[in-house]
Image (cartoon, rainbow, N blue to C red):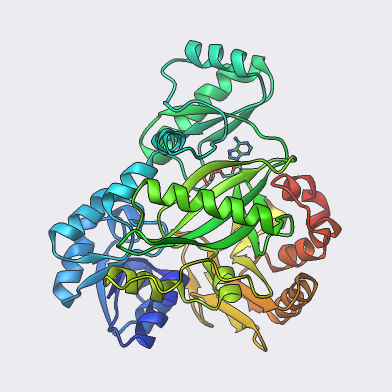
Amino acid sequence: MLVANRGEIAIRVMRTCKELGIATVAVYSEADRSALHVRTADQAIFVGPPPSRESYLVQQRILDAAKQAGADAIHPGYGFLSENASFVRACDAAGLTFIGPPASAMDSMGEKTRARANMIKAGVPVVPGTTEPVASVEEARAYVEKIGLPVMLKAAGGGGGKGMRKVERMEDFESSWRSAKSAALNAFGNDAVYIEKYLEKPHHVEIQVFADQYGNTIHLNERECSAQRRHQKVVEETPSPILSPELRAKMGEVAVKAAKAVNYVGAGTVEFLVDVHRNFYFLEMNTRLQVEHPVTEWVTGLDLVAMQIRAAEGEKLGLTEAPRPNGHSIEVRVYAEDPSRNFMPSPGKITYLRVPGGPNVRDDSGVFPGYTVPNVYDPMISKLSVWAPTRREAIARTQRALSEYVVKGITTNIRYLRAILANPEFIEGDYDTSFLTRQHDALL
Ligand code: ADP
């Protein structure tokens, strides 16, 4: 198995491969010569200079590395080439098994506007808005006058919370439109922008789905991901504190319908926004393993990477329905960043590291003492996740584990994470996507 990624997720995938008796191949850039994923793999192949555009994102380099190593399969992790349909086709053409959905399913879900159109066709409720990129600012203005403010302008090719602009006042519309378009072009090389109604104080609740090659498709319950900063998740948990068993079943059923509509195979995530009346709307589908998959593994007892590999080998799905969630799990994302300096990344050398342990604590990390966190990649250094019988105990366990975490040499967001877990709104459980922004000052 060649793992076309770096950091914690590359190591996460390799761990399961080892347990399955599958030899692993790492790829690495100039900035990652001494990285932990390189040391974890059985074999490692150099793929280019530090910028990912010149290494991890160069399809031919990855394919050549696979050929050189004699790999049969490629696991893309998340990010990089994981949702790139042309890469999937290139793997197919080279006789390599891509661990993920077929290119056609990625095509159907890749562009947000196309995904929305496909979901409407399948009878899945979507966030109200346009199903096509909007051609001109005049057309956009006319549409907004019809559906009313506030709206969200979004990049059709978007991801990672980028290229999104909320518009509250008509006098700001034109400048927001221009800024959304240039952000979209900058981040995704495509300036197509569409319009969604802005939902007030929604929850982000996503459903993990899984399908084998024969159309057997199930959901594996939800993850609550409303603790977000700049539209990016910081803390995730399952079960969601706001979901009744009835709503879980309903959302699960719709997520399965969404996956079936695009002939999905493997692990995927259907993201929804849930409004104050507990109506839910399709937001997008991520056609890959998600960063926050460990919380699902904790409460279901499943190994999602092993399931991905088995599905790719053509094994039939053993489960026929969602396992009942057992207990509670929380994940926090540990970043090399400085919350007191506007969350500026703080790369540098880790001079001392103590990683939390103890019962039901998992640390998916990509670093070690003496390692220098490079400044060219995402600054997430680890994901700490815990399991406990109840949510209250899971919060206490996360706090206990975070109190054990010692990282010296670089600044991290650990204190900020502890403040989130101690915040009364988080403890109470009904926190929406505006939570971290509203509590910004109290959490610093
Ligand atoms: P990305 O693909 O960039 O992550 P998403 O479409 O998944 O973007 O949205 C990310 C987050 O942005 C959501 O979880 C939510 O907090 C916020 N968001 C997106 N669309 C809307 C909307 N129409 N109304 C309110 N919030 C939204």
Quarter occupied by residue 416: bottom right
Q: Nearer the viewer, residue 52 or 429?
A: 429
Front residue of 132/191: it is 132
Q: Could you tell whether 111 is left or right of 69 in the image?
A: right
Residue occupying the point 20% across, 69% down: 65
Q: Residue at x 67, y 40 (%)?
A: 279
Q: How many marks?
A: 0
Visible in this render: residue 35?
no
Residue 332 screen position, x and y as percent: 64, 66
User: Furthest-right residue in view?
Assistant: 424
Q: Quadrant of the C terminus?
A: bottom right
Residue 443 in sight here: yes
Looking at the image, residue 214 sits to the left or right of residue 420; the answer is left
> Which percent across, then down, holds residue 218?
47, 61
Q: Does residue 423 appear left or right of residue 437 in this picture? A: right
Which quadrant of the render holds ligand 1? Answer: top right
Q: Is residue 359 above or below residue 373?
A: below
* Res. 391 image quadrant: bottom right
Q: Is residue 333 above or below residue 35?
A: above
Using the image as rendered, state which of residue 196 and residue 276 is in the foreground.
276
Percent x, y for residue 144? 59, 17
Q: Residue at x 40, y 54 (%)?
A: 287
- Which quadrant, please, contains the N terminus? bottom left
Residue 68, image x and y in percent?
14, 73
Residue in the picture at 44% in, 76% down: 12
As displayed, is residue 291 above or below residue 432? below
Above-or-below relation of 109 to 72: above
Q: Quadrant of residue 333?
A: bottom right
